[in-house]
Image (tube, helix red, strand yellow):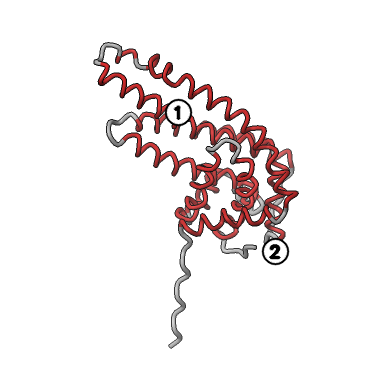
């Protein structure tokens, strides 16, 4: 009787982090790709910093305006409540901003990030049964998917904001959920090019693809989300994340990786 083959180990969180490291290694060995991939996030980072500064400056005023019911409270209760409100508002804003930042950067730099993704595919041996879509098909689809993703991020940000107001544990739970949601949404955006080459074009199909290996996906996506939330760090992270997302797609589909 033939011995049964051992089951292949499923990739986990550490493997997802490793894929991001591979993405960095890939673009660092190709300075031209790194330089081109850094231009779009540099532009959008400036816009992000402006919005973050404005939100930070006016978070207290927004908290006071949004909580008139607390005007009659004792300062010992009112001030901590409004401070938590302002902090949670800022955290929820970061989630929405990172997603808007990611979507805009991918839209602005679509040819560059597609070039980076194609370079990964070429180094790994190409794409079996490749599917190519004309611009008149994929451009409107990309615009619609970008708007839907931003809307989903806005809804998630509102939900996390409300969760963050729960006394005691709300802030921590909101932060954890924000990283999980943000990491997944960002990964779903970043794998778009690699997925489309394989005929996976709908957001729901991308979700199912990533859902095959959720720990692997989040191991990649959460560090990307955290790093992209730091203004101007994204200038270096984005090209690596574009390469890493292609490697991630290939790994989930059990194809050769560089």
Q: Position of residue 212 (x, y in %)?
A: 48, 56
Above or below residue 119? Residue 155 is above
| Gap in angstroms between the C-alphas marked 2 and 1 | 44 Å
* Residue 74 shown left or right of residue 211 in the figure: left
The N terminus: image quadrant: bottom left
Say which residue label 2 marks.
125
Residue placed most toward the observer, 38 or 112: 38
Above or below residue 190? Residue 128 is below
Residue placed most toward the observer, 96 or 137: 96
Label 2 or label 1, whichever comes before in sequence order: 1
Q: Residue 70 carries which label?
A: none
* Residue 14 shown left or right of residue 31 in the figure: left
Please identify, in this view, whether the residue under mark 2 or under mark 1 is nearer the observer. Answer: 1
Above or below residue 120? Residue 86 is above
Q: Position of residue 160 (x, y in %)?
A: 40, 33
Mark 2 closeness class: few <14, some 14–19, many ≥20 residues within 10 Å: few
Say which residue label 1 marks.
90
Above or below residue 165? Residue 67 is above
């Amino acid at each position: 009787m033939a011995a049964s083959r051992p089951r292949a180990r499923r990739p986990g969180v550490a493997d997802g982090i490793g894929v991001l490291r591979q993405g960095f290694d890939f673009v660092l060995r190709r300075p031209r790709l790194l330089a081109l991939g850094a231009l779009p996030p540099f532009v959008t980072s400036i816009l992000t910093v402006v919005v973050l500064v404005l939100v930070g400056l006016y978070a207290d005023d927004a908290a006071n305006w949004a909580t008139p019911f607390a005007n009659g409270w004792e300062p010992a209760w009112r001030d901590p409540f409004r401070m938590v409100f302002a902090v949670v508002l800022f955290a929820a804003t970061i989630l929405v901003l990172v997603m808007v930042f990611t979507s805009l950067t991918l839209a602005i730099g679509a040819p560059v990030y597609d070039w980076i993704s194609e370079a990964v595919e070429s180094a790994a041996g190409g794409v079996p049964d490749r599917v190519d879509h004309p611009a008149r098909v994929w451009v409107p689809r990309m615009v619609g998917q970008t708007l839907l993703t931003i809307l989903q991020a806005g809804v998630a940000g509102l939900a996390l904001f409300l969760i963050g107001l729960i006394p005691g544990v709300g802030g921590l739970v909101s932060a954890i959920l924000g990283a999980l949601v943000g990491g997944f949404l960002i990964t779903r955006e970043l794998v778009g090019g690699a997925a489309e080459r394989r005929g996976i074009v709908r957001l729901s199909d991308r979700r199912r693809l990533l859902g095959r290996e959720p720990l692997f996906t989040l191991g990649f996506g959460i560090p990307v989300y955290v790093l992209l939330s730091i203004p101007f760090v994204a200038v270096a992270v984005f090209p690596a994340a574009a390469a890493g997302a292609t490697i991630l797609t290939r790994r989930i589909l059990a194809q050769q990786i560089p």
